[in-house]
Image (spheres, coloured by chain):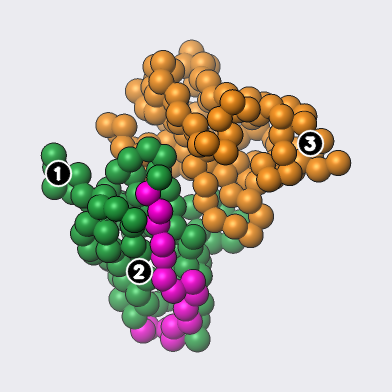
């Protein structure tokens, strides 16, 4: 059974940094692209970033480009999102998500999500 | 970026009745190499992550009840719940995965009338 477990988020001041992690199990981690998708309180879903199975290719939403970095450690079955220069508008529940296969970015598997609050 | 527009924003349907949600993309999401539409539907209940219902516009995910069906092609798509059950109260999102970035519709809230 696929399981995705995000680390705890938290309260961060504007301009601050936070690293999220997502521990994966139940599948061959290195064979699948992984993504982060976020949802601001009471709002819809927004794709944030994707990393290829091998880690060599990364993609970002314009809203986070240059501030967020996605990475993975395939030996630890763990996905990361380093978030720097955080803004109030980054406040959201952050989900890690797994594609089904073949690089098509729809998501059958999601973590439970972790809340990141950016506020002074 | 491809913009996904859902309608209506919310709808109230009686138990056992049909619910229909529309999704329109700003450009075609039909992938010519496999003649499939790169369109997915999700259900999200409060406090839960989204749950994939449909992909390739009309392929039901394993375990999804057959009262959920997807249709459409090109730029216009529909999610139909043929006989609304109480457990179907949720927000529904469409998503295109034809091109980067993948984009979601704004959501449609389904309630019981």
Q: Quadrant of the C terminus of chain A?
A: top right
In the visual, does B107 lie left or right of B46? left
User: Are the residues flagged by discs 1 and 2 from a single subunit?
Assistant: yes
Disc 3 is attached to a residue of which chain? A
Residue A109 sits in which quadrant? top left
Q: Residues within 10 Å of mark 3 (few under 14, many from 20)?
A: some
Residue B32: numbered disc = 1
Q: Is residue B92 magenta?
A: no
Characterize the local packing of mark 1: few (<14), some (14-19) or many (20 or more) Cα atoms within 10 angstroms: few
Q: In the image, what residue occupies the spot 14% across and 44% down?
A: B32
Identify residue for label 2.
B22
The reply to whether discs 3 and 1 touch (Cβ–Cβ < 8 Å) is no
Colour given to chain B in the rendered image: green
Q: Which residues are magenta?
A: B2-17
The structure residue drawn at horizontal position 13% and vertical position 39%, both measured from the top left corner, is: B33
Identify the secondary structure beneath mark 3.
loop
């Amino acid at each position: 059974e696929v399981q995705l477990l995000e680390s705890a988020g938290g309260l961060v001041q504007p301009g601050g940094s936070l690293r999220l992690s997502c521990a994966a199990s139940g599948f061959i981690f290195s064979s699948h692209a992984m993504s982060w998708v976020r949802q601001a309180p009471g709002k819809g879903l927004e794709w944030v970033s994707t990393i290829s199975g091998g880690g060599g290719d990364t993609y970002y939403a314009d809203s986070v480009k240059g501030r967020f970095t996605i990475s993975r450690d395939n030996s630890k079955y763990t996905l990361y999102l380093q978030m720097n220069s955080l803004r109030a508008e980054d406040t959201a529940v952050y989900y890690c998500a797994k594609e089904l296969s073949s690089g098509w970015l729809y998501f059958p598997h999601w973590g439970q999500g972790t809340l990141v609050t950016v506020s002074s | 970026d491809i913009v996904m527009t859902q309608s209506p924003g919310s709808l109230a349907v009686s138990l056992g009745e049909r619910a229909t949600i529309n999704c329109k993309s700003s450009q075609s999401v039909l992938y010519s190499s496999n003649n499939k539409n790169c369109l997915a539907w999700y259900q999200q209940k409060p406090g839960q992550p989204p749950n994939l219902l449909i992909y390739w516009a009309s392929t039901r995910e394993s375990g999804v009840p057959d009262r959920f069906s997807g249709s459409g092609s090109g730029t216009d798509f529909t999610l139909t719940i043929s006989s609304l059950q109480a457990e179907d109260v949720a927000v529904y999102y469409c998503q295109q995965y034809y091109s980067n970035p993948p984009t979601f519709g704004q959501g449609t809230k389904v309630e019981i009338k």
